[in-house]
Amino acid sequence: MKILLAGSEGFIGKAFLDNLSKDFEIICTGRNLTKENKTRIKIDLVLDDLNKLPEDIDIIVNLASQQPSGINVSWDDLYKGNVISTLKLWDYAREIGAKKFIYISSTSLFNQSSPSNKLRHDSVALPLTEYGLTKYISEILLKVRSEDENIKTIILRFPSVFGDGHKGGLVKTFYDLAVENKTIDVFNNGKIYRNLLFKSDAVSAIKKCIENETLENFEIFMIGSSDSLRSKEIAKKIVKLTKSKSRINLVSKPSPVDSDIFLDLEKSIKKLNFKPSSIEHGLKCFIEGMNNEI
């Protein structure tokens, strides 16, 4: 099976390659790839014509994404990087007769959830950020384009993904402070519930989609950890696992993520045979990986 991986330079893309290079023939694409060859193609999905991409691809996995980080990321950047690039890649997949198009979306499509009202594949989206809006627009357009087409279009909605090798995010921030025994400031008084996805579970979910032959023409799956924890509990677990002397300081200042996230994974578990790990298990794997880097 031959897979084209868009966004291979990113954190999840690298984890995908580390874990699945022996299982599939993978063609990598990216804007900043060096040492181009038959399996590494430097291409800008927004600016470049995609006719330089191979035509014998079975499945496209789209991890390419314009993140909202940085003060110079405009709406135009987000729209082109998340919507235009996705549509161009899907059109390419249709033109070459690919069997499946897997798009990595985000739980940032949603505002709020609770233990009694978990986010499902069919929950009504209400993005409150421009990034979330571009992901939602991409989903809508993929659904429209997938009608009456032979290519199966699969959307996986991820929460924040963490793991060794990731340069930012909540877990890495808390970890860096913990290993130096520095005070850990937890915003929103530590009350916000987070669902975080360890990198190996993210890769596992994508692999399940690649190998599943029973999926419908258009499918959406929620992917995440088996539990949601308050941010202060995540900080406490990191302090304990690192045997840190850090003090946890709860502050009222709002965090970039200020909505509780609870996910209903029933469809993913039943239809994809996805086996979610707990956040604590992911944290243990993350810290083990960080220790191996030292």
Image (tube, helix red, strand yellow):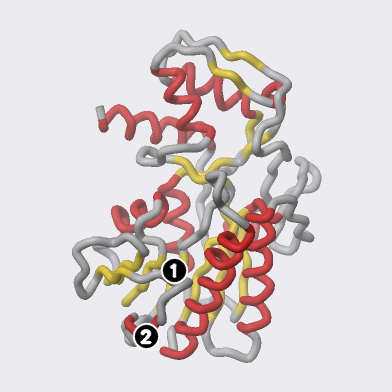
Residue name at image x 47 percent, y 13 percent = 182
Label 1 Cα neighbours within 10 Å, binned few <14 / some 14-19 / many ≥20: many
Residue 162: x %, y % from top left: 47, 41
In this rendering, would 252 be left or right of 49?
right
Res 197 seen here: yes
Q: Quadrant of residue 42?
A: bottom left
Quarter in which the C terminus is drawn: top left
Amino acid found under the numbered disc labelled 1: Val
Earlier residue among tags 2 and 1: 2
**Residue 61 badge:** 1
Task: Count numbered badges in the picture.
Answer: 2
Q: Is residue 28 above or below residue 291?
A: below
Image coords of residue 241 (percent x, y): 44, 21
The answer to whether the residues at label 2 and label 1 have Cβ atoms under 8 Å apart is no
In the image, residue 64 above or below residue 37: above
With 281 as the anchor, is 125 left or right in this view? right
Q: Residue at x 35, y 51 (%)?
A: 15
Near-viewer residue (63 or 238): 63
Amino acid bearing label 2: Asn
**Up-down: is 174 above or below 51?**
above
Quarter location, residue 13: bottom left
